[in-house]
């Protein structure tokens, strides 16, 4: 629980605590995602190295910005954002990114699944926030818009001219990496 002492005007403590919980989950996801993207940036190799290397950095910066925006919303609502590495690891519901040094296609395949998970979680939050807090819902919508754009950038490298994704049916990052590679 957030254990708040105050919240924004017009919102009950109970609703605020639920919104803070949703925000905290996204804060963990945003912090994990920007670190994962930077990891990919450092570990990608192959013929399309520079294109992917340079494509990833603006995504890192944008997602870092999302984390800051989320943390500030938590504080605005009377909560205390948790952004430590231990907090991320302790509270995440997803697996650690599993690829080290790999080809551009392998990393992009794995990132396809990462983005699917992050975007799905944002969309679940949006559904719940509609009645709880339209301000936070709007923030989630804006961030989801950018995440879906970044996901499209990733998927553009994974699809053939017929629109078929090389990662179709993959259920793990390693499966997706192998399918894409």
Image (tube, rainbow, N blue to C red):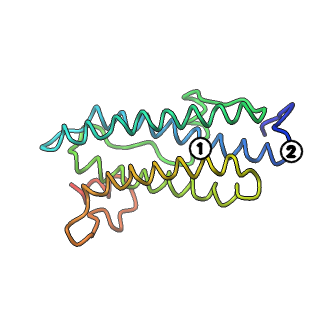
Which of the pair 161/81 is nearer the observer? Answer: 161
Report the side of 40 relative to 85 (left or right).
left
**Split into 4 quadrants, where in the image is the N terminus?**
top right
Residue count near mark 2 (Cα–Cα under 10 Å), binned few <14, some 14–19, many ≥20: few
SS state under label 1: helix
Q: Which mark is residue 26?
A: 1
Percent coordinates x, y for residue 100 in the rendering: 29, 38
Relative to 3, residue 154 above or below? below
Percent coordinates x, y for residue 145 in the rendering: 49, 52
Q: Measuring 32% from the left and 42% from the top, which residue is drawn there?
A: 99
Percent coordinates x, y for residue 89 in the rendering: 55, 36
Q: Measuring 36% from the left and 49% from the top, which residue is drawn there?
A: 111
Which of the pair 68/158 is nearer the observer? Answer: 68
Residue count near mark 1 (Cα–Cα under 10 Å), binned few <14, some 14–19, many ≥20: many
Q: Measuring 49% from the left and 38% from the top, which residue is drawn there?
A: 32
Q: Which residue is mark 2?
A: 10
């Amino acid at each position: 629980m957030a254990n708040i002492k105050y919240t924004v005007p017009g919102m009950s403590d109970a609703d605020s605590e639920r919104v803070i919980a949703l925000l905290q989950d996204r804060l963990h996801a945003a912090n994990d995602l920007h670190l994962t993207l930077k990891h990919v940036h450092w570990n990608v190799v192959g013929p399309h190295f520079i294109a992917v290397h340079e494509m990833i950095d603006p995504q890192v910066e944008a997602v870092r910005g999302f984390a800051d925006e989320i943390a500030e919303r938590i504080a605005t609502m009377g909560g205390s954002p948790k952004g430590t590495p231990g907090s991320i690891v302790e509270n995440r519901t997803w697996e650690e990114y599993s690829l080290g040094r790999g080809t551009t296609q392998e990393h992009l395949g794995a990132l396809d699944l990462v983005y699917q998970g992050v975007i799905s979680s944002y969309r679940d939050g949006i559904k719940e926030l509609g009645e709880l807090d339209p301000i936070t819902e709007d923030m989630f919508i804006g961030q989801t818009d950018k995440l879906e754009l970044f996901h499209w950038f990733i998927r553009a490298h994974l699809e053939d001219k017929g629109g078929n994704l090389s990662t179709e049916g993959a259920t793990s990052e390693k499966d997706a990496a192998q399918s894409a590679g």
